[in-house]
Image (cartoon, rainbow, N blue to C red):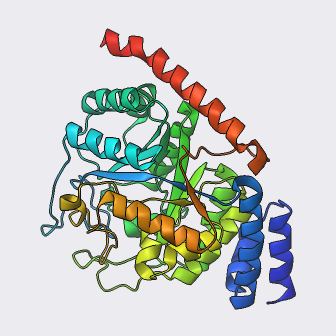
Amino acid sequence: MTETVRALIGRLEVGDTLTEADFRQLLDGSDGSSDALLREKAVAKRKAVYGNSVFVRGLIEISSYCKNDCLYCGIRRSNANAQRYRLTEEQILSCADEGYALGFRTFVLQGGEDAYFTDERLVPLLRELKRRHPDCAVTLSLGERGKESFQRLYDAGADRYLLRHETADAAHYASLHPPELRWENRMECLRQLREIGYAVGAGFMVGSPGQTNAHLAKDLCFIQEFQPEMCGIGPFIPHQDTPFARESAGSAEVTCRLLSVIRLIQPNILLPATTALGTVHPQGREMGILAGANVVMPNLSPTDVRKKYSLYDNKICTGEESAQCKDCLQTRMRAIGYEVVVDRGDPMPHGASAASQSEVVSRKSEVDVARCLSSVPIRNSE
Ligand code: SF4
């Protein structure tokens, strides 16, 4: 490891703001020894804020229909081989009920941009979900919808929204998406979500076609500036029925390096060790946690649709029951000294420590219940 890289890691550790050129230097100069130092520093930061807790999010993949045509995605609209399904409202609720019994306190409703899931359908669904499970957080991951829709879903009880920015470089974004999807609009959506009050999740693929360290340095600057509450990063994995079928997958090693850097940039961030990371490496999720991640996302979708939600090839965990997924991850986390906890897993405020965590969680739950109760008149007036 060069002295420059060591100094940059030291600056990150003390909370200095790095420039794009600094991040580029860090990434260009990284090697095995700097990765080990990054891991050590990132784990110390994560432990100071979240202790040894790993938060679980119950992922419910509600629809494989999508009106978009992102070049990397297996459920893009022009993939005639994609198997399409959408869950009924009752199926979604029963996945959540099952998840609740298993100890999940956050549900993530994720799907393509499916016109079926209008606000008129989602609002009563969210209210019912919150009525059944008022102590749970609901995260939406349903793409770009417009500010009015984001607001209505928030008022109906959604707490968090995941919308990966995919790349902080407009030209790179244009090379991964069809012309109708605009980078400026993606960024505007993230700002709108923040304004409304959601806990916001950004994120990007690692090793996407055409990506360089210069692009990644921009992503890190964006994270440093925007300070999302969550950041989902995972290796790019090609899907056989997309224009990127022959591209190489991103690496677990670089993904873990970036997880560590992001943890150092923002110690309180919620950072998943993604399923994609577990797909490119059999111990990928353990590696992610040991690099500074603190969230895992077991699948709660009905087993008969899991293979159909095929964003990339060889996705793991498509055959197991929900309970098996949870148990498997619990065992994996215990084996590396971490504990999956029954907890909403809200983002901690900046500068908070593990000791103040339970206080924040209970305060968040009170706020959440109050918001749900205050939204009841809106339901009645519709
Ligand atoms: S990445 Fe998302 S928006 Fe793009 S095609 Fe896939 S599901 Fe649709």
Q: State the residue in front, 312 or 273.
A: 273
Is 314 above or below relative to 139?
Answer: below
Q: State the residue in front, 136 or 313.
A: 136
Which residue does the image show at 49% across and 57% down from the upper left? 165
Q: Is residue 250 left or right of residue 62?
A: right
Is 316 above or below relative to 330?
Answer: below
Q: Quadrant of the C terminus?
A: top left
Residue furthest out toward the left? 80
Q: Is residue 189 left or right of residue 54?
A: left
Q: Quadrant of the N terminus?
A: bottom right
Q: Is residue 316 left or right of residue 339?
A: left
Instruction: Place residue 319 in its image quadrant.
Output: bottom left
Percent across and percent down for residue 43 are 72, 68
Which residue does the image show at 76% across and 42% down from the upper left? 356
Instruction: Place residue 361 in its image quadrant.
Output: top right
Is 1 above or below relative to 159?
Answer: below
Q: How many marks?
A: 0
Can residue 205 be seen at all in this image of the molecule?
no
Which residue does the image show at 19% across and 49% down from the upper left? 86
Which residue does the image show at 68% across and 80% down from the upper left? 27
Q: State the residue in front, 276 or 99.
A: 99
Is 168 above or below relative to 287?
Answer: above
Q: Is residue 164 left or right of residue 4?
A: left
Can residue 333 be seen at all in this image of the molecule?
yes
In what quadrant does ligand 1 lie?
Answer: bottom left
Percent across and percent down for residue 191 are 55, 41
Q: State the residue in front, 365 or 350.
A: 365
Percent across and percent down for residue 372 are 47, 22
Percent across and percent down for residue 177 are 36, 63
